[in-house]
């Protein structure tokens, strides 16, 4: 990206703000090197990192970057064998400690709220606690090598302190003596060049032996080392030299430890700079109240209330702009100081910010495009005397843009064709815009030429736009209006300012009729736009009211659903209790039947079985009986004749009427005949005329002690009528024997037997469900029935 264009669009000002939010020199340096990316995947990754950091900053606050410094140069010196000083070693130690704290901080947050990119970055930070501890054992927080760094250093430091004490004691005794004190300027001990001296008056130099190390500015005082302590100072100097050599040895050892980890330390520096840079982007996003834009590389851009980030929030006017869908070029017209240039810069700057992985100051859902380059020719209006140079400058920039741009570029042109003869300038502007548009670039251009309004109106893919101007207040509103060309408003402004009407009328007469029609057309469009805007505001207000009502409705619905769930839960509990009670009664009845069968020895008489069934029916919950009674009452009363298909309410079973006797009827139910009350019957289907009632053989159910209930019934070779009778008997036996599942073998054949049996099972009251046999169970030749 051309550096001049970045300066023109004020991108560097944003970068300076970004660098100011970095907490370390590493992050600041990385921020200052930031350039827009031109690959969609790279941009998405940059934005994802910013989004994760923004989330962390919002939930947990600023991460800890304390103690982290740029250790790149010290690490390089350690790598080539140089000795690091205590300050550099302490910087490495604090950086390792800060990196460890930062790593723990991000990893802990990732457990609560996933931040995968930051997590992966922090996971790559090395844990070098041994090196950190080794440095801390030798160097304190003031970057001083401490006595405990080595036993030799501790011994030397003890000797130094002892020697200094002895020298001071000797000098104290000397300056307190009457013979010496009168020669001293002050009774104090000082140091010159690491040697202890005393201030002696210049006139006593001949009477006072020793070595002169310094003198005062006036020459009245000489700083003399008495001869009696020269040897002591020499010894102290030797001890200090030993101390320096020992410190050098310690620093070399620590430097060697650093040199062993240079690759890891350099990589850590890179990761730390990335992390600081990413969180700086998050803090900039919070500063400008930015949002995460949706990115694409197909040339589509849609800004929702986009704001220029360098204009204060209370003064900036948001813009709504769309480019790259129905139209790829926008021609913006309007008066000077109306905000055209700011609009161009806003579109360009927000595109650059998004391509750099920065949030943009716009509403959620804004979309921006990754361009291969952004070109801009933007400059302020010049005076008449400078028109020639202005036009030449603009042409030079535009020629450069035309030579570099591609179909995936964004071109921003301010006052295209300005600075020369209007007729030639407008023609040249149309030619330039047509060339750029035909290439497929995305383009936004501003102009004063009315010819360009007509060009935008006639050319497919190009649309007019304007900066709104309030004639009543004679001031711009800085709002961008897409689809509406701008008006000059010269006559309206002149009239409002008080220009005589006769002059205005003469001026209007000088305007070409074609230009007047254009102005009237624009005025009509403006009037329609204002009307549509008012209607839109009304619709928006109505939408908000509907949203509010919908929210209230949803809250009430949720409350009703909660009440319903509570009632259903209560009903389910009650129903469960009722079913449990009925099941207990049924089990008791079945046990009685088994005992009865054993007592009878041979068989259970039909009337006893019927009585047992009635007893089982009486165990049915009262609510079901009531519901059944209601359903029966709701049915239309019909006369029942022999041969009719009926349903017995009390047994919940279908059958055929064999004969009628007063208020009772004999009903064939499977293999059994029963006498039931006519009121307990519901007519399902009347018998066809002349149809005879089929007489079925009544078979008693026999159960003996030696019987063993089968779980399989083989019907292969039987006809459908015989098979149905056998199935009915088999299901009753299995049900009374408490079998949960039975197998009915009917073979594959033509499928008639299988279909008839399954239809019968579907209606049987004791069958819960049925299915075709699985692989290994017989497949389609077997039907498996699950009993209630």
Image: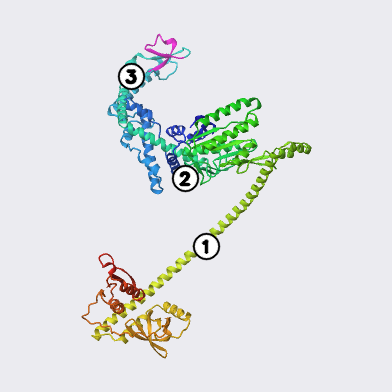
The span picked out in magenta is 196-216
Res. 446 in view: yes
Farthest-out residue, right: 502
Q: Are marks 2 and 1 in contact (CB under 8 Å)?
A: no
Give the label on residue 556, or none: 1
Image spot of residue 719 (x, y percent): 29, 77
Res. 105 in view: no
Image spot of residue 394 (x, y percent): 58, 29
- CA gap between label 2 and label 3 equals 59 Å
Quarter occupied by residue 326: top right
Instruction: Choose mark 2 or mark 1, whichever is in front.
Output: 1
Mark 3 crowd level (few <14, some 14–19, many ≥20, 10 Å Cα): some
Which colour style is shown?
rainbow
Q: Is residue 722 above or below residue 347?
A: below
Please give the name of the residue rendered at 33% of the width and 19% of the height, measured from the top-left corner: 237
Q: Are marks 3 and 1 in contact (CB under 8 Å)?
A: no
Image spot of residue 687 (x, y percent): 41, 83
- Of residues 335 and 189, which is closer to you in this image? 335
| Count of labels in the image | 3
Mark found first going from the N terminus, 2 or 3: 2
- CA gap between label 2 and label 1 equals 33 Å
Instruction: Choose mark 3 or mark 1, whichever is in front.
Output: 1
Instruction: Choose mark 2 or mark 3, whichever is in front.
Output: 2
Q: Which residue is labeled 2 in the image?
A: 58
Q: Secondary structure at mark 1?
A: helix
Q: Is residue 247 above or below residue 786?
A: above
Q: Which residue is labeled 3 in the image?
A: 237
Q: Is residue 132 above or below residue 684?
A: above
């Amino acid at each position: 990206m051309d550096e001049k264009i970045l300066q023109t669009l004020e991108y560097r000002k944003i970068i300076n703000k970004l660098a100011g939010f970095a907490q370390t020199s590493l992050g600041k340096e990385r921020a200052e090197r930031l350039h827009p990316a031109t690959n969609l995947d790279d941009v998405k990754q940059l934005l994802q990192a910013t989004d994760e950091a923004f989330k962390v900053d919002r939930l947990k606050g600023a991460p800890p970057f304390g103690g982290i410094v740029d250790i790149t140069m010290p690490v390089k010196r350690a790598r080539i064998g140089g000795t690091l000083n205590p300050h550099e070693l302490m910087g490495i130690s604090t950086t390792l400690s800060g990196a460890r704290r930062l790593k723990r901080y991000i990893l802990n947050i990732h457990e609560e709220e996933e931040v995968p990119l930051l997590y992966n970055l922090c996971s790559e930070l090395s844990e070098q606690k041994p090196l950190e501890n080794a440095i801390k054992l030798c160097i304190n927080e003031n970057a001083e090598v401490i006595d405990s760094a080595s036993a030799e250093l501790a011994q030397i430091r003890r000797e130094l302190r002892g020697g200094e004490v002895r020298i001071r004691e000797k000098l104290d005794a000397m300056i307190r003596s009457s013979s010496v004190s009168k020669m001293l300027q002050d009774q104090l001990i000082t140091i010159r060049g690491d040697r202890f001296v005393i201030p002696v008056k210049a006139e006593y130099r001949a009477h006072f032996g020793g070595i002169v190390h310094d003198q005062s500015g006036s020459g009245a005082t000489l700083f003399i080392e008495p001869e009696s302590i020269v040897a002591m100072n020499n010894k102290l100097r030797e001890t200090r030299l030993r101390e320096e050599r020992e410190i050098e040895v310690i620093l070399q050892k620590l430097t060697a430890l650093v040199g062993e980890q240079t690759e890891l330390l350099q990589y850590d520096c890179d990761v730390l700079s990335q992390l600081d840079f990413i969180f700086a982007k998050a803090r900039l996003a919070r500063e400008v109240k930015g949002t995460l834009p949706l990115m694409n590389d197909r040339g589509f851009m849609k800004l929702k209330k986009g704001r220029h980030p360098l204009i204060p929030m209370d003064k900036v006017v948001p813009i709504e702009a769309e480019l790259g869908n129905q139209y790829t070029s926008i021609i913006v017209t309007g008066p000077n100081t109306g905000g055209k240039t700011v609009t161009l810069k806003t579109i360009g700057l927000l595109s650059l910010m998004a391509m750099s992985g920065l949030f943009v100051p716009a509403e959620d859902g804004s979309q921006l495009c990754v361009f291969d380059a952004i070109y801009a020719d933007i400059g302020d209006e010049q005076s008449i005397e400078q028109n020639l140079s202005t036009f030449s400058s603009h042409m030079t920039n535009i020629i450069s843009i035309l030579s570099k741009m591609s179909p995936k570029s964004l071109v921003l042109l301010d006052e295209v064709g300005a600075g020369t003869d209007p007729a030639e300038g407008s023609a040249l502007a149309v030619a330039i815009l047509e060339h750029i548009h035909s290439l497929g670039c995305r383009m936004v251009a501003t102009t004063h030429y009315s010819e360009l309004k007509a060009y935008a109106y006639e050319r497919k893919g190009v649309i007019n736009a304007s900066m709104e101007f309030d004639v009543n207040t004679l001031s711009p509103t800085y709002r961008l209006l897409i689809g509406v060309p701008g008006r000059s408003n010269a006559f309206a402004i002149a009239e409002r300012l008080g220009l005589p009407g006769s002059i205005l009328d003469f001026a209007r007469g000088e305007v070409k009729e074609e230009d007047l029609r254009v102005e009237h057309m624009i005025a009509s469009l403006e009037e329609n736009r204002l009307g549509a805007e008012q209607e839109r505001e009304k619709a928006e207000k109505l939408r908000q009211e509907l949203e509010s009502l919908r929210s209230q409705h949803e809250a009430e619905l949720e409350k009703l659903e909660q009440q319903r769930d509570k009632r259903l839960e209560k009903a389910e509990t009650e129903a469960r209790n009722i079913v449990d009670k009925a099941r207990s009664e049924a089990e008791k009845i079945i046990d009685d039947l088994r005992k009865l069968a054993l007592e009878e020895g041979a068989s259970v008489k039909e009337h006893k079985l019927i009585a047992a069934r009635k007893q089982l029916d009486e165990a049915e919950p009262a609510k079901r009986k009531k519901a059944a009674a209601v359903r029966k009452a709701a049915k239309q009363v019909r006369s029942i004749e022999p041969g009719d298909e009926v349903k017995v309410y009390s047994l919940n079973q279908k059958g055929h009427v064999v004969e009628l006797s007063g208020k009772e009827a004999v009903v064939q139910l499977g293999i059994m005949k029963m006498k039931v009350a006519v009121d307990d019957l519901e007519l399902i289907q009347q018998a066809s005329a002349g149809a005879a009632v089929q007489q079925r053989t009544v078979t008693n159910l026999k159960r003996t002690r030696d019987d063993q209930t089968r779980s399989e019934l083989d019907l292969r070779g039987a006809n459908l009528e015989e098979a149905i009778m056998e199935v009915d008997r088999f299901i009753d036996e299995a049900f009374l024997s408490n079998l949960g599942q039975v197998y009915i073998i009917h073979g594959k054949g033509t499928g008639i037997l299988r279909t008839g049996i399954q239809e019968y099972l579907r209606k049987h009251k004791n069958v819960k469900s049925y299915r075709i046999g699985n692989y290994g169970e017989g497949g389609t030749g077997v039907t498996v029935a699950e009993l209630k």
